[in-house]
């Protein structure tokens, strides 16, 4: 069988790719010809059966789905271009249609390790005839459906994407009529969604190239049940498709997995374009095989569903195969060079730039954050450069209310660049939350290095003003909103989780400045966002200014980081637990399998293993190396505290994916996947360089141990790109064998402690004390660890 050949490089598609890279501002009107019209054809259900009684094709599956009123159908799909022309149901004997004979075989088996799961193998073959533009699909139909059900497709759909749709261009921000208006809904440019409008067509279509895990999930609030179906990325006919459709009265829904995936509309960075997806061509003897795993389980809340998802997300695709490419020490060397290459040496001002332009953009992609690893290097030259950066940026970048502007130009003048250019006083909340959190971390780092005298009182004063601003805004508004006004401190755009990092920053500031009020506000805010956004809607939103108010990965991780900070400050275990829960949501944004790229791409030719790439948001459909912008040390802290290895494995995946992005010399690119928004950058590292990927790379290499060991317990994990195993354990210590399989010399940090020591929070500067073992290329060393001391045999 062969997929129908089509031109995937249309003018509009290329144009959208340019817009997504930020080169132009692309108004939505460029795609208006592709807007869905409310015609009778569109309003008619395409995937939900109009039969009152369905013929059972797999009673075992129907019995499994009985508690959530589900039933399975097997479909033959005929396409007219990208439109589903007809979906015909198989019966137990197969299907004969248009003179062609199809044969099906369905096998069900229990999942031995989990009574809540079953495996379903579907095999469909064409016995006689020849067909074009076709495919198969497995539909799971649910009666007694409710729009209160939480629907999640990893990295593409959260809470059904039931947001208000508004037509805005790339990085344009909301319509100005919404400024300072409190009761506004969450809004997005057109994306795949289940419609929040009664009577409107409610259907979303996503292909696996835009998903972190090939899965569909929903939680029934009424039935207190969760459902998850997982499969592989593709079959012989191409990437699989995932469709969710609701009936007009919203009493029924079908969750469909199709092979191949054929979407009616292709989502771009802004809006949709005409779909180039096509069905496959079959000849007698051709077949399609689908392996599905279904879970139906008790779930009292959305967090329960997300925890189950993290537990099972690799259960079909299986273990991934990361490559050991570049050791942490080499990453530090290269990324130090890259960050130093961003040093701006002006006549009047000098500072570290976070981007490829002569300015500082505060927070987000590195402003006043890329200075942290430069301090950690511990030498005088880098400390002097950081000092000049702080001296330049901190007093000049701060507005009257205590918040920092969006950006500071090399001439010392502030400006706005967050979609509200005509209102430079309006800034993305996330940016100031980042500054608060990371500046306190840097003060703590200097003190841990014995350099407290290098912290200027002026810096402390300005950062305390920032903390005061967050407290004042919270008291007056009860939230921090999406955007803030740096002059008067008011919320300029309401809603979203853009302030997710602020509770963590306030918690650290409470200790640093001895201000209990900061901690009280941090706790109130953390509980507010935890309940309103995470528990009730299963999503966190709006951590990027180039999108609107979409669900995204950064806000999920930032909130987990804030909750961890609260745990470390208060020692209250509830915050550790809540941070753990947010990491389950974060895992849904992180690719869980060895994502396959087209054969012609650079990364495919290089044999890249892309498990661990992190998807940006439901609008910005691309996968990036590492988290923006962090080492993801929260995952390590949870593993250390709980011993649950899946958090360490998730972190190892992220580290490995970042290594796949690095070109010789430390050059990185933020976009690795072949998402629809950017066909021009399909699977290529290219020549682009991205500052925040340099920063998160060096942070991972510094803040994470190369090898972690609990000497008197079972926890042992390797994060660096070396190989290690325990040779011997005895009453006096542990013997390790370590090998460097990479093409670079390695200097491996070993963090060894007791189980009792692991009960104490880790803090933010412990990496300064980890001893390191030097290994040449291919070298093997045996190391003895006694009382946390390292002895090389």
Image (cartoon, grey):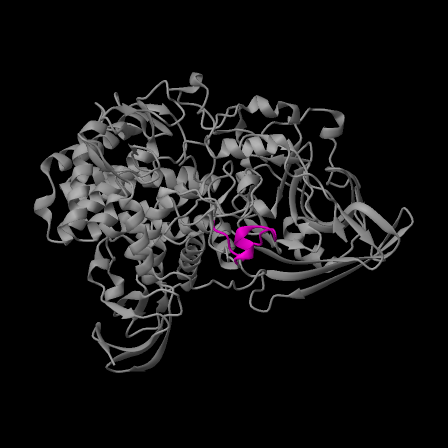
Q: Main secondary structure of the magenta part?
A: loop
Give 613 or 428, whichever is nearer the viewer.
613
Q: Is residue 570 visible?
A: no
Give 138 or 301, whichever is nearer the viewer.
138
Q: Position of residue 84 (x, y in %)?
A: 75, 38
Q: Decide: is 536 above or below 646.
A: above
Q: Position of residue 211 (x, y in %)?
A: 55, 47
Q: Position of residue 119 (x, y in %)?
A: 65, 62
Name the quadrant containing residue 283. bottom right
> From the viewer's perspective, is 192 left or right of 78?
left
> From the viewer's perspective, is 742 left or right of 784?
right
Name the residue: 56% across, 68% down. Answer: 113
> From the viewer's perspective, is 639 left or right of 346?
right
> From the viewer's perspective, is 183 left or right of 781?
right
Question: Where are the magenta residues, as a range?
Answer: 590-606
Name the image quarter holding the N terminus.
bottom right
Name the residue: 44% across, 16% down. Answer: 177
Residue 603 on the magenta segment: yes
Residue furthest out toward the right: 99
Name the image quarter holding the C terminus.
bottom left
Q: Is residue 452 visible?
A: yes
């Amino acid at each position: 069988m062969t997929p129908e050949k089509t031109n995937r490089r249309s003018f509009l598609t290329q144009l959208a790719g340019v817009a997504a890279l930020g080169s132009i501002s692309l108004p939505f009107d460029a795609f208006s010809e592709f807007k869905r019209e409310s015609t009778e054809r569109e309003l008619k259900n395409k995937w939900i059966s109009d039969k009152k009684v369905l013929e059972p094709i797999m009673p075992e599956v129907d019995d499994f789905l009985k508690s959530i009123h589900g039933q399975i159908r097997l479909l033959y799909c005929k396409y007219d271009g990208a439109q589903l022309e007809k979906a015909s149901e198989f019966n137990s004997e197969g299907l004969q249609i248009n003179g062609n004979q199809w044969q099906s075989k369905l096998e069900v088996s229990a999942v031995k390790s989990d009574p809540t799961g079953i495996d379903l193998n579907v095999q469909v073959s064409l016995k006689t005839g020849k067909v074009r533009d076709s495919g198969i699909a497995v539909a799971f139909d649910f009666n007694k459906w409710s729009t209160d059900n939480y629907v999640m497709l990893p990295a593409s759909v959260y809470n059904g994407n039931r947001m208000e749709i508004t037509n805005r261009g790339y990085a344009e921000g909301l319509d100005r009529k919404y400024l300072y208006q409190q009761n506004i809904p969450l809004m997005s440019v057109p994306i795949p969604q289940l419609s929040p409008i009664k009577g409107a067509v409610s259907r979303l279509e996503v292909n696996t190239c835009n998903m972190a895990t090939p899965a569909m999930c929903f939680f029934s609030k009424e039935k207190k049940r969760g459902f998850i179906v997982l499969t592989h990325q593709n079959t012989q006919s191409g990437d699989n498709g995932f469709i969710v459709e609701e009936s007009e009265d919203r009493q029924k829904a079908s969750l469909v997995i199709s092979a191949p995936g054929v979407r009616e509309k292709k989502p771009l960075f802004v809006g949709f374009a005409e779909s180039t997806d096509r069905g496959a061509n079959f000849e007698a003897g051709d077949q399609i095989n689908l392996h599905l795993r279904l879970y139906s389980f008790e779930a009292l809340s959305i967090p329960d569903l997300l925890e189950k998802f993290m537990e099972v997300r690799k259960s079909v695709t299986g273990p991934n195969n990361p490559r050991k490419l570049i050791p942490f020490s080499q990453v530090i060397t290269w990324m130090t060079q890259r960050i130093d290459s961003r040093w701006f040496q002006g006549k009047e001002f000098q500072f570290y730039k976070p981007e490829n332009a002569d300015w500082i953009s505060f927070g987000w992609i590195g402003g006043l954050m890329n200075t942290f690893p430069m301090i950690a290097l511990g030498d005088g030259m880098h400390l002097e450069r950081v000092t000049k950066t702080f001296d330049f940026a901190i007093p000049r970048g701060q507005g009257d209310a205590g918040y920092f502007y969006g950006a500071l130009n090399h001439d010392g003048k502030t400006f706005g660049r967050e979609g509200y250019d005509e209102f430079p006083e309006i800034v993305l909340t996330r940016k100031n939350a980042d500054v608060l959190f990371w500046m306190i971390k840097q003060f703590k780092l200097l003190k841990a290095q014995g350099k407290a005298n290098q912290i200027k009182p002026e810096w402390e004063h300005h950062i305390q003003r920032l903390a005061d601003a967050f407290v004042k805004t919270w008291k007056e508004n009860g939230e921090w909103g999406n955007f803030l006004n740096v002059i008067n401190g008011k919320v300029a755009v309401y809603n979203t989780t853009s302030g997710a990092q602020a509770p963590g920053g306030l918690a650290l500031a409470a200790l640093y400045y001895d201000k209990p009020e900061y901690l009280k506000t941090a706790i109130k805010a953390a509980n507010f966002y935890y309940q309103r956004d995470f528990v009730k809607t299963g999503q966190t939103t709006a951590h990027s200014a180039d999108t609107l108010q979409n669900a995204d990965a950064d806000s999920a991780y930032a909130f987990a980081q804030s909750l961890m900070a609260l745990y470390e400050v208060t020692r209250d275990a509830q915050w550790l637990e809540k941070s753990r829960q947010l990491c389950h949501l974060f895992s849904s944004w992180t690719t869980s399998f060895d994502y396959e790229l087209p054969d012609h791409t650079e990364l495919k030719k290089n044999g890249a293993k892309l498990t661990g790439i992190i998807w940006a948001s439901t609008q910005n459909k691309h996968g990036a190396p590492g988290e923006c912008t962090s080492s993801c040390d929260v995952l390590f802290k949870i593993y250390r505290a709980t011993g649950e290895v899946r958090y360490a494995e998730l972190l190892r995946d992220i580290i490995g994916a970042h290594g796949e992005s690095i070109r010789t010399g430390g050059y990185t690119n933020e976009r690795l996947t072949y998402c629809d928004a950017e066909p021009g950058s399909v699977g290529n590292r290219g020549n682009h360089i991205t500052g925040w990927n340099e920063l998160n790379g060096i942070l991972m290499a510094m803040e994470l141990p190369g090898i972690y060991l609990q000497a008197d317990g079972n926890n042992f994990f390797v994060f660096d790109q070396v190989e290690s195993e325990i040779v011997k354990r005895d009453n006096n210590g542990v013997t390790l064998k370590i090998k460097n399989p990479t093409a670079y010399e390695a200097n491996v940090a070993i963090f060894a402690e007791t189980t009792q020591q692991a009960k104490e929070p880790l803090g933010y500067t412990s990496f300064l004390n980890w001893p390191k073992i030097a290994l040449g290329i291919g070298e093997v060393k045996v190391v003895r660890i006694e009382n946390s001391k390292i002895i090389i045999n």
